[in-house]
Amino acid sequence: MQAVVCHGPKDYRLERVARPTAGPHELVIEIAACGICASDCKCHSGAAMFWGGNGKPAWVKAPVIPGHEFFGYVVEAGPGAEAHFGVAIGDRVIAEQIVPCDKCRYCVSGQYHMCEVHHIFGFQREVADGGMADFMRLPATARVHKIPASLSLNDAAMIEPMACAVHTVKRADVQLDDVVVIAGAGPLGLGMVQIAHLKTPKKLVVIDPVPARRALAIAFGADVTIDPLSEDARAVIDGLTAGYGCDVYIETTGVPVGVTQGLELIRKLGRFVEFSVFGKETSADWSIIGDRKELDVRGAHLGPYCYPIVIDLMVRGLLTSRGIVTHDFTLGEWEQAFALANSLDSIKVLLKGARA
């Protein structure tokens, strides 16, 4: 089959590789689409968090087929797999991005998204390759969900990032009288806007420098948008909160200024939720978190237990990929697709399979 193979930073190649086969309790799916995530772009460019250095081990283990925002059609089921996953040949399915070990303390307590072994599709080959290929294998411990026929291809391709968005907003514990700020209106941020809007906060504010993304945020329910390049975000938030600051700040920019900006904008005793994957380490004055504001700082990782929620919201028309998926390419056009995904000229870029 055809696949994009990661051999190292800036060393990705389109290759012919062996098509996977299904073992006991395993599936093989034909890929319909695979999104290019910001983390894929950072991995491709050689960001330290993926490739190690300065005494830190590499998280990516090349060679590996990248891609964790995939879905496809079941074309092969190993012994017991259909009963194991509750699927049949021909079903359209998605697997969550993590392949848990089902043995560590986190997995056995139901917190599988924090699995100590922590294999993610598209970054390590020990368990399974990712979705930037014609076909991929889903191992027995994968978390698999069926996708209703009513969902469009673009919506189906956005289930994984939307699940991350739902989990992040849940971590924020949004209340009816909260002023909520979401920093970053990329694919994840625009999903968070839609979810946070369903929580009906007092005010929903989005910060992003790209006009088209701010316009989408308004369409998805934001009350106020801020261009950080031309507007004083602190003055706007102070004007909405009598000078106190926002109640909730969700950081999804992936750049250090998103963190320091949030620590400035948030009120004392506020809730700061960090989602982003950063290309490099960032630093902040931790006395703001403790001594000055006594903040509740929460992380958000992956989308545990959120895939069924996303699918239901999409079926009911309450969550959409409309306007977020801006471009699609064939697998053979992966270089052009990555270049566009790593720019502000796109929001979400898909690699589509032959069966799309």
Image (cartoon, rainbow, N blue to C red):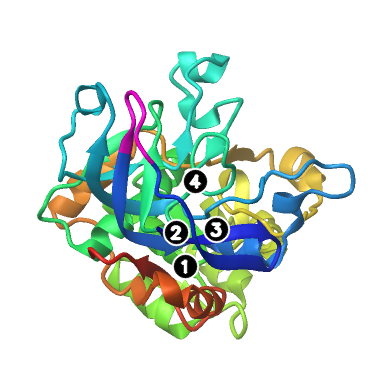
Determine the secondary structure under disc 3.
loop
* Front-most of residues 108 and 313: 108
Q: Which residue is mark 4?
A: 129
Residue 189: give x, y in percent of width and height: 45, 61
Residue interval drawn in magenta = 21-27
Eye-nearest disc, 4 or 3? 4
* Front-most of residues 126 and 212: 126
Q: Which residue is mark 2?
A: 132
Q: Residue at x 41, y 50 (%)?
A: 165
Eye-nearest disc, 1 or 4? 4
Q: Is residue 196 magenta?
A: no
Can the viewer see residue 2 in this picture?
yes
- Gap between marks 2 and 4, in whole Å? 9 Å
- Gap between marks 2 and 1, in whole Å? 21 Å
Q: Report if the CB atoms under discs 4 and 3 are less than 8 Å apart.
A: no
- Which sits earlier in the primary sequence, circle 1 or circle 4? 4
Horizontal side of residue 39 vs 200, given as left or right: right
Q: Amino acid at mark 2?
A: Met
- Which sits earlier in the primary sequence, circle 2 or circle 1? 2
**Which numbered disc covers residue 252?**
3
Q: In the figure, residue 31 lies in which quadrant? A: bottom left
Residue 247: give x, y in percent of width and height: 51, 49
Determine the secondary structure under disc 1.
loop
Determine the secondary structure under disc 2.
loop
Question: What residue occupies the far right of the structure in this picture?
Answer: 54
Q: Report if the CB atoms under discs 1 and 4 are less than 8 Å apart.
A: no
Q: Which residue is mark 1?
A: 186
Q: Amino acid at mark 1?
A: Gly
Q: Amino acid at mark 3?
A: Thr
